Image: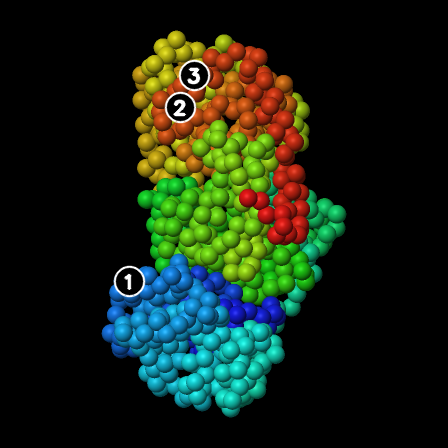
Amino acid sequence: MLLATDLDGTFLAGAPEARQTLYQLIARNPDIKLAYVTGRGLESVLPLLFDPSLPDPDYIICDVGATVVAGNNLLPIQPLQGEIALRWPGEQKVAAAFADHPRLVRQNTPQERRCSYFCESDDVDDEIERIAHSLGCDVLFSADRYLDILPKGVNKGSTLRALVEHLGIDSDRVLVAGDTLNDLSMYQQGFKGVCVGGSEAGLIEATRALPQVLHAEREGCGGILDAIAHFRMLDHLEVVEPAEVQPGRSELVMVYHRLPYEEYVEDGELKRRRPSSPNGIIPTLLNYFRDGRRGSWVAWSTHEDRHGRFQARTPVDIERYPNLVCARVQMSKQDVDIFYKRFSKEAFWPMLHTFWERAQFREDHWQVFLRVNRTFAEAAAAEAAPGAVVWIHDYNLWMVPAYLRELRPDVKIAFFHHTHFPSADVFNVVPWRRQIIGSLLQCDYVGFHVPRQVENFVDVVRGVTPMKIVHREHCAPRFLTYGCAVGVDQVTTEIEVLGKRVRLGAHPVGLDVGRVEEILKRPAVRRQIGELRRELGSTRLMLSVERLDYTKGTLEKLLAFERLLDRYPALQGEVTLIAICVPAAQEMRVYRDLQAQIERAVGRINGRYSKVGWTPVQYFFRAVPFEQLVAYYAAADLMWDTPLRDGLNLVAKEYVATQGLLDAAGVLVLSEFAGAGAELKGAVLTNPHNIDDLVASCYQGLSMDESERRSRMHMMFEIVRHNDVRRWGDDFLAAVRADATPPERMAS
């Protein structure tokens, strides 16, 4: 059968349960063909094509019948489109002919091969008909306010009839659905039809005598379902019923690419142990299951047959989290290499950090990405209890919400974006941007680190689909507004897209300050701090800690340090830069050239400036245990943390926490392009893209008197201690569970 349906008030309307039933019926049954037949222009239909909750149309008739295209590629269906074009006198000619009509207001909506106006019913007079006739056009008035000037003989019904004949479809297997007078022409073609509940009175009256038209009571999709049953449209089809997803028992489901424990092989057996990484997020997320809450942690795991049968579900820690299981998503090494180490890092990572020219987009890798995301969604759907919260983490899992919403419309979907989210002009280079945004809009709540990233997301959404801002809030005093590159004065906290509300928020990830405090109490760490200070003597320590990555600005920092020593010779022998650069995984080929450039710069600086007993740069290209890092933080007079772009930057907070707990007076020189730059008031902000500013800010930090250093550090420590990682998680979950903003609270 062919379902030819109007959109607004029809296919997009009705009770949520009815919409889901109809959409899934169409999506799962290839013998049901779908045609959108709408007054919208094609440009206005595009957002619907990337809404994962809607089935894909096979054909699109839009512009009230003046445009007809294939649904899969949007190419005109010929010769039908060409014949319509020949009847159209041209937009400029028609617009000029009606320009002097006093009560016609041109609609500011996308339109082709038609001119559309707003007017009252009394304004549709003989003069309008005469002008249209002289142009070889027809007049169509509907819903008591919409006036369309169309090519002669062109309307929804005539184009649909031409399409049905062109495709060779049996007219008896066509069902049309609508709700206004501009749908009338479809019923006049003799097809089976339904006027859905709430239809325009004029349409009801005009179709009352037509024998094959059902006037349904239910609105939208409910009325269409009633018509399918009434006319027995599916009796000749083999209907595929959707596979029922049995709800799980977990009240809270974490969907994260990393396991909540470490897996290792010992004596040929796969074993588990607690994470040794300093990543404070995983322990924080685990804490939400300490009270016995039923939960699941969905993450990938590679498996080799020699390790025995793959375990899809394992306990995490029975003593600490008795009701928490890990739902392990089995992935091959090849899938991990493509999905994470190559595609995520070679396509999305550079784009997210505004290095779009480095991005490599491959369709075959995207298909792997989709398959992996669907697998994650299926695992989450099987674990979640009815109405559960599913908390998805980061860009690697962008498409999970789309699949999850289809599988489990009952759950509350929350997404936290751990990386930077770029501006629209950067994000839009992604070939699949509409699909990604369509997926994220299936969430109930989407969180980012800082308001700028929220606003970047909103701008991207605005370019993909019609959107209304429901609520905004001021950023101050929590965040900097005009004082840094990532500052904004207001942040959007709720949007409405295609009738659905999505809430947004800024939640900078906090630090586990207690963990830093515990490390500082260890005698071995205290001894290491003392040894560092004795080794340095009167030499002041500048510290740099980052992963090997072009986004971190390591090379730019080294070039600035070289200029600092050249511009201020008195600093030679007085300051030492310890640069710790953690290697990337061997599979990350994109960083090899950068490593060589960094090593050459270190060699050149040390060759130029070294003296007996003093080396300007001490470069460590290796992973450093967190305990040792804390010792370095404690000994450092200045933390030089200047990524070119960063979602947040926890290193800055680790330094502040260490210095604050010791009541020390170190200086944080921080990139204003890091998310933390909008949060840590008291940092010396710098533009890492400007070498002179890097030099000036560094010199400012080295020249600062003690009272100012202490004042700045005290201010930052208060922020880091109060907004710790536990508060981050609590605030995020509270925002997820909060109700949507009532319309009357909308901000201007």
List x then y, in percent, for residue 242: 57, 74
Q: Which residue is mark 1?
A: 96
Alpha carbon separation for disc pair 1 and 2:
59 Å
Q: Amino acid at mark 1?
A: Ala
Q: Residues within 10 Å of mark 2 (few under 14, many from 20)?
A: many
Q: Pick whichever of labels 1 and 2 is earlier in the sequence.
A: 1
Identify the mark nearer the N-term, 2 or 3.
2
In the image: residue 512, left or right of residue 544: right
Q: Is residue 692 left or right of residue 527?
A: left
Q: Quadrant of residue 349?
A: top left
Please name the residue that numbered disc 2 is placed on: 694
Residue located 25% across and 70% down the image: 89
The amino acid marked with disc number 3 is Tyr
Looking at the image, residue 601 lies above or below residue 347:
above
In the rendered image, the vertical position of residue 253 relative to residue 230, given as above or below: above
Q: Is residue 251 visible?
A: yes
Q: Which mark is residue 699?
A: 3
Q: Name the secondary structure under disc 3.
A: helix
Quick one: SS at disc 2? helix
Q: Nearer the viewer, residue 681 or 159?
A: 159
Residue 595: x, y in percent?
36, 34
Report how far apart the C-alphas of labels 2 and 3 lie in the structure.
9 Å
Q: Is residue 108 above or below residue 592?
A: below
**x and y, in percent, of residue 144 in the image:** 49, 70
Residue 602 at least partly seen: no
